[in-house]
Image (cartoon, coloured by chain):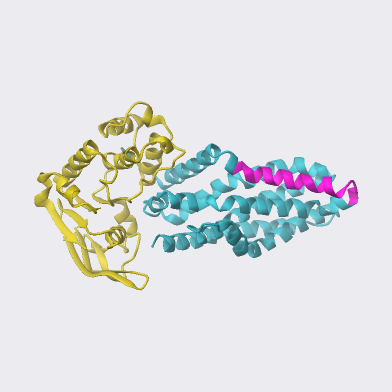
């Protein structure tokens, strides 16, 4: 037996969460299927008005990404709470805040990152130009981490509740509206050849701030649940 | 040394117990017994630092456990009434995760040997733990006792769902741990089981009944 560093502990938490997400397959990737299906339904339902599709594409992709992340959040801490692992996380030699950080990063990898990777393909259905698709991709890359981080606060506050899904949405959707607005504005600006970098910087700021404060908030919420 | 100073515990508006003063010296076992709902688990959770007492304080080596929580946790192993296992992972994967969470890394051979000492072998080790019986899960969780180097064990109903041979293995582990001048705190709601914790442990026992 040898002692290991904090970084190794966090890595093992990250790996475990990814492994669990893969073994649960249908559950985890349900959110991804939801995203693909709903985004694809719009061009089918709205007909072939290319101008209209181009105009609404950024909004639709962002709203669907937001809802897909929301769907996957309720299990983030609830499973660990149900099987008693949360107590072990709280009693780890590694601070709970950092453990939560690792868990949320893992959550982003099996939701946000995958959404982001398939979004360029979905964007083709809306006849977006390659420039806009590029900006959409960058905006999602910078914005989706904040969806996971802010969402984790809702997940932590609703641990132990039976139907937490609706409550999570109610709690955190207001906090995610800035991401939605900034994300769509960036793509709109790129569409009309305007300066869009400012929106991207704001998205980065939002993600960085939420990645710092959300784990602190989650840790306090989880400690109250365990008390 | 583990001390409590006049701690009390309230759940809702109901005062479960109050003014509990305990001193657990090296090599001693704290045995908490009492009826269901009398607050045994609450006492253990307070000792582990998971819950906070309404009044009073818990001291480890003369210092409040909240002051250097990290240091306290590095010496503490708490196993709740439910084995903390992920149903999708097998015994080895679960134990790898749990030991790493405690900042210790254990080789796989060592883990298999430890599981074998708890009479778990062959296929059961590599099955997702959702396919194991309650007793087997409990054994997997208790294997942590053999793997981790911790001074203070806090075990909530460790004898639950263990059969006679499992209880024997656990008693031996407890005995070994106490001989090294370490500490154990545990609960059980069964009085007959209490007699079960090996006669050799009796002189080391401190009993508290709610």
Q: Is residue B69 magenta?
A: no
Indicate whether B144 appears above or below A92.
above
Magenta-tinted stretch = A28-51
Tell me the quarter of the image containing the N terminus of chain A.
top left
Tell me the quarter of the image containing the C terminus of chain A.
bottom left
Q: Which chain is yellow?
A: B
Residue at the image point whose x is 58% and y is 43% from the top: A27
Quadrant of residue A66 within the rendered picture: bottom right
**Residue A91 appears anywhere in the view:** yes
Horizontal side of B108 relative to A169 (left or right) equals left
Horizontal side of A152 relative to B47 (left or right) equals right
**Residue A209 appears anywhere in the view:** no
From the top left corner, tell me how far across and down residue A149 is, in percent: 57, 56
Q: Is residue A48 magenta?
A: yes
Q: Which chain is cyan?
A: A
Indicate whether B73 appears above or below A18.
below
Using the image as rendered, state which of residue B56 and residue A93 is in the foreground: B56
From the top left corner, tell me how far across and down residue B50 is, in percent: 35, 59
Quadrant of residue B143 within the rendered picture: top left
From the top left corner, tell me how far across and down residue A24 is, in percent: 54, 40
């Amino acid at each position: 037996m040898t002692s290991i560093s904090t970084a190794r502990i966090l890595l093992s938490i990250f790996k475990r969460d990814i492994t669990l997400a893969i073994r649960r397959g249908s559950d985890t990737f349900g959110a991804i299927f939801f995203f693909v299906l709903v985004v694809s339904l719009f061009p089918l339902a709205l007909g072939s008005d290319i101008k209209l599709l181009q105009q609404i594409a950024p909004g639709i992709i962002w709203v669907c990404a937001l809802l897909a992340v929301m769907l996957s959040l309720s299990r983030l801490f609830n499973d660990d709470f149900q099987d008693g692992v949360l107590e072990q996380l709280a009693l780890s030699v590694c601070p709970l805040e950092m453990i939560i950080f690792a868990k949320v990063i893992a959550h982003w990898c099996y939701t946000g990152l995958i959404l982001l990777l398939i979004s360029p393909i979905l964007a083709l259905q809306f006849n977006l130009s390659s420039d806009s698709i590029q900006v959409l991709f960058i905006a999602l890359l910078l914005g989706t981490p904040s969806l996971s981080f802010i969402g984790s606060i809702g997940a932590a506050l609703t641990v132990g509740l039976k139907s937490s899904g609706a409550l999570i949405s109610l709690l955190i959707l207001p906090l995610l509206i800035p991401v939605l607005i900034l994300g769509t504005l960036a793509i709109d600006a790129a569409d009309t050849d305007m300066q869009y970098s400012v929106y991207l910087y704001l998205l980065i700021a939002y993600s960085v701030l939420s990645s710092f404060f959300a784990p602190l908030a989650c840790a306090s919420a989880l400690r109250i649940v365990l008390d | 040394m583990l001390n409590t100073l006049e701690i009390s515990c309230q759940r809702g508006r109901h005062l479960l117990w109050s003014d509990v003063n305990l001193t657990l010296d090296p090599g001693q076992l704290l045995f908490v017994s009492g009826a269901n709902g009398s607050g045994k688990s609450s006492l253990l959770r307070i000792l582990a630092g998971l819950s906070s007492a309404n009044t009073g304080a818990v001291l480890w080596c003369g210092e409040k456990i909240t002051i250097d929580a990290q240091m306290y946790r590095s010496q503490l192993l708490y196993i709740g009434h439910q084995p903390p296992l992920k149903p999708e992972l097998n015994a080895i994967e679960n134990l790898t995760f749990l030991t790493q969470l405690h900042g210790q890394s254990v080789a796989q051979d060592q883990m298999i040997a430890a599981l074998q000492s708890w009479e778990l072998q062959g296929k059961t080790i590599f099955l997702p733990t959702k396919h194991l019986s309650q007793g087997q899960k409990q054994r997997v969780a208790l294997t942590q006792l053999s793997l981790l180097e911790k001074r203070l064990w806090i075990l909530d109903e460790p004898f639950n769902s263990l059969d006679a041979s499992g209880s024997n293995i656990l008693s031996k582990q407890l005995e070994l741990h106490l001989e090294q001048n370490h500490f154990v705190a545990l609960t059980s709601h069964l009085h007959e089981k209490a007699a079960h914790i090996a006669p050799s442990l009796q002189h080391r026992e401190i009993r508290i009944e709610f």
